[in-house]
Amino acid sequence: MPSQLWPYISPGIPDDLFEHLPGIPLSQREIRLLLIAQLRLQPDTILWDIGAGTGTIPVEVGLLCPQGRIIAVERDEEVANLIRRNCDRFEVKNVEVIEGSAPDCLHDVKQTPQRVCIEGGRPIQEILQTVWHYLPSSGRVVATAANLESLYAISQCFAQLQARNIEVVQSAVNRLETRGFSQTLAAVDPIFILSGEKLD
């Protein structure tokens, strides 16, 4: 369902429409679009977003899947409140924010996920193994890696879990920016997006 602030059915909300805090990660619009595409959502999808940061994915998915349910997991109280404020800005009502550190807090989530997005968390392999336990057959995990160490850790864990239909995408996005009197293309930080499915 579109909101007054974003009255469109297509994803891709501009970054500057979100409230944000210095130092808190914000999934930039083009990266967000790639993530959402890899999630393969349905109208009633139940999504866990772990390390939800500014809340851009919960807001976008909440608007795209009005009959769905999004569980946004964030360990910092101030950041969790930021997610709530961004949901209010876009009139998103189907997001629940869980304050806690993954994977420990995941045991308290009452709704089983069909899709999981992992955007943060240092014990990435432990988080992956935990969410895999909750995923049903044909459930799907999408995880981001900003460096080679995380890329290796996620790849290794997918192999151990015998994930199927694994895909790896590295973004290469440039945006037009005005610098002084000229316009130039500036690169958005590249990121790896890995996805895999649980098939029993």
Image (cartoon, grey):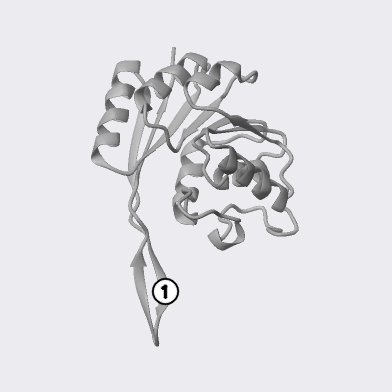
Residue under the point 25% across and 32% down: 152
The picture places residue 129, in percent across and down from the top left corner, at 40, 18
Left or right: 149 as drawn, with respect to 109: left
Q: Judge by depth and name the residue closer to the eye, 120 or 77.
A: 77
Q: Judge by depth and name the residue closer to the eye, 62 or 179.
A: 179
Give the vertical position of 25 relative to 196 (above or below).
Answer: below
Give the vertical position of 129 relative to 37 (above or below).
Answer: above
The picture places residue 108, in percent across and down from the top left corner, at 60, 17
How many numbered discs? 1
Left or right: 34 as drawn, with respect to 189: right
Left or right: 67 as drawn, with respect to 126: right
The picture places residue 135, in percent across and down from the top left corner, at 51, 18
Kindly indicate the quadrant of the structure image that contains residue 194: top left
The picture places residue 130, in percent across and down from the top left corner, at 45, 17
Q: Mark 1 Cα within 10 Å, few/some/many (few <14, many 20+)?
A: few
Residue under the point 49% across and 27% down: 101
Kindly indicate the quadrant of the structure image that contains residue 111: top right
Residue under the point 68% across and 58% down: 6
Residue under the point 28% across and 36% down: 151
Kindly indicate the quadrant of the structure image that contains residue 149: top left
Q: Please, which residue is most extreme toward the bottom here?
A: 181
Q: Which quarter of the rendered picture does the C terminus lie within?
A: top left
Residue under label 1: 177
Q: Amino acid at mark 1?
A: Glu
Q: Judge by depth and name the residue closer to the eye, 106 or 61.
A: 106
Query: SS of the residue at dot 1?
Result: strand
Q: Judge by depth and name the residue closer to the eye, 75 or 143.
A: 75
Give the vertical position of 89 relative to 71 (above or below).
Answer: below
